[in-house]
Structures are given as structure tokens and as C-alpha cells.
Amino acid sequence: MTPILISLLVFVAVAGVVGLVAFVLADTPSRTADRLDLLTGRRRKEDDEAASILKKSAFENDKRSLLHLLTPNIPSLQKILMQADCHISASTLFGIGLVLGVLGATGSWLAGVPSYLTPLAGLVMFVVPFGWLLNKRRMRLKAFAAQLSDALELVARALRAGHSLAAGMHVVAEEMPSPIADEFGRVYEEQNLGIPIEDALRSVCDRVPNLDLRFFVTSVLIQRQTGGDLSEILDKIGYVVRERFRILGQVKALTAEGRLSGIILIALPFGLFLIMLHIKPDYVEKLWTHPTGVKMGVFALIAQLVGALVIKKIVNIKV
């Protein structure tokens, strides 16, 4: 490999990283200026702004892409970003993955990795940002579920003290940590801008796909139509949520052995394949050079997939 080619590849990689950083930080000054205008009073939250928010809240669910119509149970990337509270756009995340993929493929090529494994290294690096996003979403939803019972009891105590439901949510936003403080605070701000609290509660269910939260929202909607003691209802829901969370912890402890066994059994063939590919490549190359080896590889992948589904079905206990 000539030094000119190496220099060219390094230049392209550095230029891509610099361009990506500039693209991510491009709109920071405008956001800062908007916040300063709000603080100084140059931009007031007038009725036209509230009307635009109402219009957006009313019609945002009507927009459906073709991919969403074909796969209604799979959340879109933008929705996952919203649920993870990740303040970057989907295009930015895709750009980061693309740059990492190019860097991974280039680095593996420069390191002398066989050419047929170079695309695999690039693919692994490409999915790293998406794995980080899914993990961030999972951790945020887990923290929200752990805080929900305390938040409901706090709202119930605020109702007994004579406050309204919106004021109780404001208390949660002021007294409890993130992420539940952010979501309840957003509901409080939305209803202050004129959005009906029923719509604000429905939107928080879209941002946080939590079954216990849906119990809370459904009970509030029914109570506002039929009447009743909302504080007592929230106390009972908080107790049910706390017990479900406790039982779920016990179930995870009892199924930990099965989940760990599934991870080991699924990862063992791939790990052994990589080890043998490094130690003796000619021993495993029959899997893609010989027709029988190709059939065996396809059958092994199908068996791995079926086994993973069976193990998941065994250890996934609904509470």
C-alpha cells in the first residue's frame, strides 16, 4: 500500500469527522438565541403559538409513512429518539454511523484483516450508535418505571392538599429527578399553553411506552368523565404499580439462569467460528466454499434463530 493512498484515506476520514461535528453543532447558536429571546421577553408565548402547538398535537398522529403502515408495531427511529430523550436528529445519527462504518472498514483494511471481513467490521461500527440509542432508551424507560409509583403517590398527596391534577404534576416535576420530572413537567407546560390535559396525557403515553403509565392515564380520563375520588384511585394504582415492579424483579431473578444460558448458547457458535477463523482459516472456509457447507451454515443459522425464539418464550413471563 503506497503512502499516498494511506494519506488520502486518513484525509477523507478526518474530513468526514470534522464535517459531522460541524453538522451536529450547526444549529446550536439558533437554539441559544431562541432561549435568550424567551428569557428577555422578545418572544412571548402568545395565543398563536399555543394554537400552533394545538394544531401540531392534533394532527401529528395523522402523518404516517409507508414504512409505518407496513410495520405498525415497529417504532420509527424518530420515535425511538424521542423515547430515549436524545436531542439529535435521525439523519445525524445515521451520519455518525456511516462515518464510524467507514472508519471501521478502513481501519480493519489497514490492519491487514482479510478482505472478506472488512465489510463486517464496517457494519459492526455502523450499528454502534444505534445500539447506544437503544440502550439509552431502555435505561430511561427502566428508570421511569421505577419512579412511577412514587410519583403517583406524590400526586395523590397533592390532590388531598387541595391542589389540582396539573399542580400535582408540577410538584412531581419540581421534586423528583429525571426522567419522570421531565415528562410530567412537559404535561404541565402543555396544559398551560392551552392543550387539554387529556391530550397531554395521551401524548406522554406515546413518549413513554409503559403499561403502568397507561393505567394512570386511563384512570384519570375515566375519572374526569364520571367523577370520583382521584386521590384514592391514584393511591391504589401506585400500590399496584409498586407490587408489579416488585414481582417483576422476582421474576427476573428467577429467570436469570435461563437468560444467561440463552446468551451463552447463542454466542458460543459465533465466538467459536471467529476463533477458528483466526487459528485455522482453511478449516472453516468450507462453510462458504463447499455446497454442503453452505447448506449446513444456513441450517445452523435457522436453528439458532428458532432456539433464540424458544428461549425468549420460556424466560419472558408477563406480569
Image: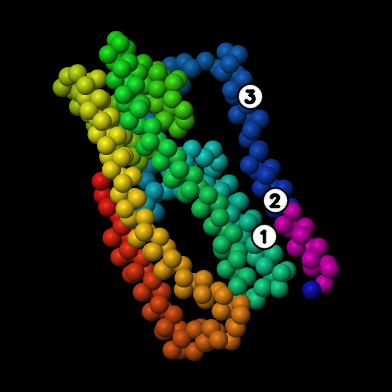
Provide the residue designation for mark 2: 17
Residue at point 42%, 30% (across, down): 180
Report helix, strand or loop for mark 2: helix
Three-letter residue code for mark 3: Ala
Residue at point 65%, 65% (across, down): 105
Residue at point 31%, 40% (across, down): 246
Instruction: Determine which of the numbered discs, if any, sits on residue 33 in the image.
Output: 3
The Cα atoms of the two marked residues, 1 and 3, are separated by: 35 Å
Residue 236 image position (x, y, % from top left): 22, 28
Left or right: 291 in relation to 195: right
The Cα atoms of the two marked residues, 1 and 2, are separated by: 10 Å
Left or right: 70 in relation to 134: left
Residue 257 image position (x, y, % from top left): 36, 59
Report helix, strand or loop for mark 1: helix
Mark with earlier residue (1, 2): 2
The colour scheme used to paint the residues is rainbow
Provide the residue designation for mark 1: 103
